[in-house]
Image (cartoon, rainbow, N blue to C red):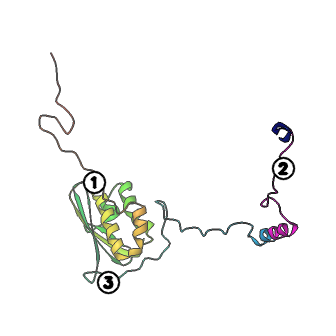
Amino acid sequence: MTEKENTPPADEPKATAPDESAATTPADAGDASDAEAAAPASPPKKTPKPRKPKAGDKTTIEPKPSGAPPDGHWWWGTGRRKTAVARVRIRPGDGKFLVNKKAHDIYFTEDRDRADLLNVLDKTNTTGSLDVHVNVQGGGYMGQAGAIVLGLARALRRYDERLEPILRSNAFLSRDPRKVERKKYGQRGARRKFQFSKR
């Protein structure tokens, strides 16, 4: 008999050894169902992280002095905006807010400036519980109001360190670096040129 007669036809499948990994016994199937029943149905839930305060949030803590004031009477903060410099002092009291020995609503005639000052106290939940005394000089009313906001925020941070996150999230502790650009020589202003006529 020749070798061609010994080879099986192409249509017949070749006999292969039984795959041990594919074969499962009823006992194995029972073990698998027990393992599925023992496994938890869903992964454990993660505990949510505490949310960071946003710009519109208001603090719910009751501000308290974190220590004695450095000079024994006041907590200080200095703020600057444009050419204005404000020196702010705070202490526990009945809510007086004096700017250059005048009530803040008399010193500042614009509602915008008054709202900016009171916004700091409102967001930190200190309205009516602190006396604020401010000495401010230089600049105009809007620059002075910006300087007072920064000085008041710095004083509140020294008064109670727990207020820092809410002060930062509302950008009260950020120094505004914008100033009027200086005039350039040979020009009418900072960018304005003198009129030029070709003919």
Amino acid carrying label 3: it is Ala
Nearest to the observer: residue 32 or residue 61: 32
| Residue 177 in view in this figure | yes
Q: Are marks 3 and 2 in contact (CB under 8 Å)?
A: no
* Quarter-of-image position of residue 196: top left
Residue 73's place in the image compared with 55, above or below, is below
Residue at the image point whose x is 33% and y is 62% from the top: 149
Q: Earlier in the sequence, mark 3 or mark 1?
A: 3
CA distance separating discs 3 and 1: 32 Å
Amino acid carrying label 2: it is Ala
Residue 35's place in the image compared with 12, above or below, is below
Nearest to the observer: residue 41 or residue 189: 41
Decide whether residue 26 is among the magenta residues. yes
Question: What residue occupies the far left of the structure in this picture?
Answer: 185
The crowding category of the residue bearing disc 1, from other C-alpha atoms within 10 Å (few below 14, some 14 to 19, many at least 20), is few
* Quarter-of-image position of residue 37: bottom right
CA distance separating discs 1 and 2: 85 Å
Residue at the image point whose x is 30% and y is 81% from the top: 69
Q: Quadrant of the C terminus?
A: top left
Q: Residue at label 1?
A: 177
Percent x, y for residue 62? 46, 77
Q: Residue at label 3?
A: 68
The crowding category of the residue bearing disc 3, from other C-alpha atoms within 10 Å (few below 14, some 14 to 19, many at least 20), is few
The magenta stretch is 11-33
Q: Earlier in the sequence, mark 1 or mark 2?
A: 2
